[in-house]
Image: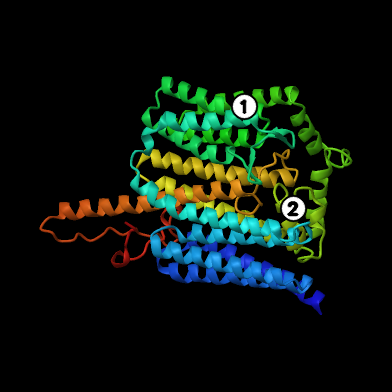
Amino acid sequence: MTNIIIQLSKYLIIILMAAYTFSCFSIFTRSYEDEEKRVLIRQDVLLFLIQFVAFGTMYLATEDMRILFLYAALAVVLLAVILLYNLIYPNVSRLVVNNMCMLITAGMIMITRLSADNPSPYGSAIRQLVFAVLGIAFGLVVPVLIRKLTFLDKWTYVYAAVGGAALLAVALFAPKSGGANLGFEIAGINVQPSEFVKILFVFYVAASLNKSREFKNVVVTTAVAAAHVLILVLSTDLGAALIFFVVYLVMLYVATRQPLYAAAGLGAGTLAAVAGYHLFSHIKVRVEAWQDPIGTYSGSGYQVAQSLFAIGTGSWFGTGLFQGQPDTIPVAETDFIFSAITEEMGVIFSLCIILICVSCYVMFLNIAMELHNRFYKYVALGLGTCYIFQVFLQIGGVTKFIPSTGMTLPFVSYGGSSMLSTMIMFGIIQGLYILREDEEEKLEKERESRDGLGRTAPRKTRKTPKSGPKFEEVPRQRTRKKQRTHSK
């Protein structure tokens, strides 16, 4: 009977996840302001139903009460997140908040499953929940800082100096881990500075390009960015180096609109990749494993081969929780968690995770397009690119689309540095969303003052064509004017 329930539960989880994912994109096809409450409440219900079914299934499979305690703790934490954002920041993007909670849920389900047989059962799941709580605390503070600190665009070289120093310290003093210098172990917790430096890097590039887009300043900015990438290459932290490189290239092109800069950057990146392949044996091993994981199964290709076996075993609907063997994948909790999820929860569930990440990126681009402040526009674009490219590197590596770079899947993979840095990034984005609301309120007051006599001018409404609203006009997520409040 238990096996039947477990097999049925995987279909129910997939249906709930598909419904949630559909709701993420349905907002881009209708007037979201009219549907806001209903869609968000539906997402919250689906989120907690998925938690209930998944953790209930794992309890039936193991009869371990600790799983129920983890479920209760996770439900309380995420319910607190949703309520606190509603109370403190009523004008933030609730879609992004819900997506953040859903990704944390998917990660916690699989980390709980994988850590059941560890020497310290469920230790990783408990630590991940603690990391989530700490990240949420940062995420709730950051938006108000973004709104209050109006001098962030002035600290151009402070960002570069602090970030460069942190990366250099890792390159010189950090111990080797998996062939790369990644970070330090403090009180039993691995701290990876590059996860936080990428945020400083985005702020540096945004501040520098906002100050000037003349050729001389572009050369200086490029030199500083290249120094960051070079230090990461010397540390053989190739995933982070790629993220820094791509983020800078995208921000530079958007700021200058010069195809020549983009072409030169791609050419330099290609030459650097070829040189790195011949200079670093670590890179050669990764490329060999990517080219033929089966042929190198007994050596470098073992991880990728096991990942592909897991994805193939799971197929569309997965084997069911505790019915597969995801623990045979090396570092399944961190680098290969997407493969573990696919094996037991199915390809459809994994595709939904990808689409949820894409919907977050769409919201980031929407915020960047509508901000009037050029510095914050660049910041939103840079952080969004940083986030979605990391998702691409992680999923591309475990599916053999590209060589594995050892990146984590934001909010899903186990790791304190990844969780905290991603939560800070999302907090910054939410702060920029509030700034966008402030800008529109200011413009509205200017229209009222031009109307004269203290009378309120009617607010211009966006005309929605019959074929559907334009992309950038949909996910505005504002409350009605009478209900509009801002945290002080």
Q: Can residue 50 be seen in this snapshot?
A: no
Residue labelled with disc 1 = 269
Where does residue 369 sit, x and y in percent of width and height? 42, 46
Residue 291, compared with residue 474, is above or below; it is above
State the mark number for residue 339. Answer: 2
Name the residue furthest top: 216
Taking the spot 44% from the left edge, 39% from the top edge, the residue there is 378
Where does residue 218 sit, x and y in percent of width and height? 45, 24
State the mark number for residue 450. Answer: none
Where does residue 348 sit, x and y in percent of width and height? 70, 61
Check disc 1 and report its element: helix, strand or loop: helix
Task: Out of 106 and 253, give the one closest to the viewer.
Answer: 106
Kindly report the distance in space between the C-alpha atoms of the residues bearing marks 2 and 1: 29 Å
Taking the spot 15% from the left edge, 55% from the top edge, the residue there is 451
Residue 142, compared with residue 108, is above or below; it is above
Q: Quadrant of residue 176?
A: top right
Q: Can residue 6 be seen in this snapshot?
A: yes
Callout 1 amino acid: Gly
Quadrant of image for the N terminus = bottom right
**Which mark sits nearer the N-terminus, 2 or 1?**
1
| Marks 2, 1: nearer the viewer | 2
How many labels sit on residues?
2
Taking the spot 47% from the left edge, 51% from the top edge, the residue there is 427
